[in-house]
Image: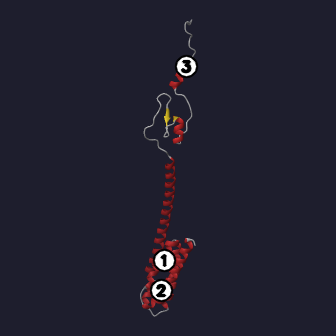
Amino acid sequence: MSIKYVKFIVAAAITAGYFLFLRYIAPSQEPYFILGIGLIGYIAWLYGMAAGLLLSVLLIPATLYIYNQFEISTSYVAYASSPAYIALEILAAVALGRMRIKNLMLSNKETALASANGKLQAVLAQVQELGGIHSLCTSCKKIQDDDGAWKRIDTYLLEKTKAEFSHGMCPDCAKEFANQLEPKPAAGRTRL
């Protein structure tokens, strides 16, 4: 059973409980109709401001009907239909309905933040940081890996990080390479 149906069943049970409470406890001549404000606030929290306002409109005549069935002081009937009491019902519906909206927005933001944090943690888990001291050949510039094998530094970094390499030649090496390509004069011959 989904939470939507559970909320509906709980709201219906509480509303029915309120009316049964008024029907059977109200003859004790106490102002139990005030509990209606709590009921309206609860419904507004569950279903929003419109549902709370609708319930407040329906609750007033129902409460007055129940109270008019008994020989109760007319002051309770007057209180239950007074503008102040109606304003409290509307205030409960509006305030708790707005709190519900803000709570839902905050919940959505927290969910989005948790999702973004999870993605960030997953990316951070994939990042490997090179640290410590590594042996590097002074001549060929190969690096010794954790197993003791010597590898080209670009191969080693490609295995350990997400870095990719393309090959090129720095200006100093380009000059040296060009010098190696130049033909050398043969020994004993002079240039003219």
Give the residue displayed 49% in from the left and 52% down from the top.
Answer: 121
Amino acid type shown at disc 3: Gln
| Residue 53 x %, y % | 51, 75
Would residue 190 appear left or right of 77 to someone viewing this image? right
Quarter of the rendering containing residue 91:
bottom left
Res 86 visible? no
Answer few, some or many: residues within 10 Å of disc 1's Cα (few below 14, many 20 plus, some between 14 and 19): many
Taking the spot 54% from the left edge, 79% from the top edge, the residue there is 12
Q: Is residue 144 above or below residue 88?
A: above
Tell me if residue 127 comes above or below residue 114 in the rendering. above
Q: Quadrant of the C terminus?
A: top right
Disc with the residue nearer the chain's start (1 vs 2): 2
Q: CA distance from mark 3 to mark 2?
A: 104 Å
Give the Cα separation between the discs numbered 1 and 3. Answer: 92 Å
Instruction: Inspect the image, locate mark 2, and give the three-letter code of the amino acid beneath it.
Output: Phe
Q: Which residue is at a point 55% across and 9% down the rendered structure image?
A: 187
Q: Position of residue 45 (x, y in %)?
A: 49, 72
Q: Nearer the viewer, mark 1 or mark 2?
A: 2
Q: Residue furthest front?
A: 148
- Disc 1 to disc 2: CB gap under 8 Å: no
Q: Which residue is mark 3?
A: 180
Where is mark 2, residue-wise?
A: 21
Callout in the foreground (1, 3)? 3
What residue type is disc 1 on? Answer: Ile
- Viewer-proximal residue among 189 and 178: 189
Using the image, determine if residue 70 lies above or below residue 182.
Answer: below
Within 10 Å of disc 3 (Cα), the crowding (few <14, some 14-19, many 20+) is few
Mark 1 lies on residue: 40
- Kindly state the secondary structure of the residue where label 2 is placed: helix
Residue nearest the viewer, comparing 102 with 182:
182
In percent of width and height, residue 174 lies at 54, 24
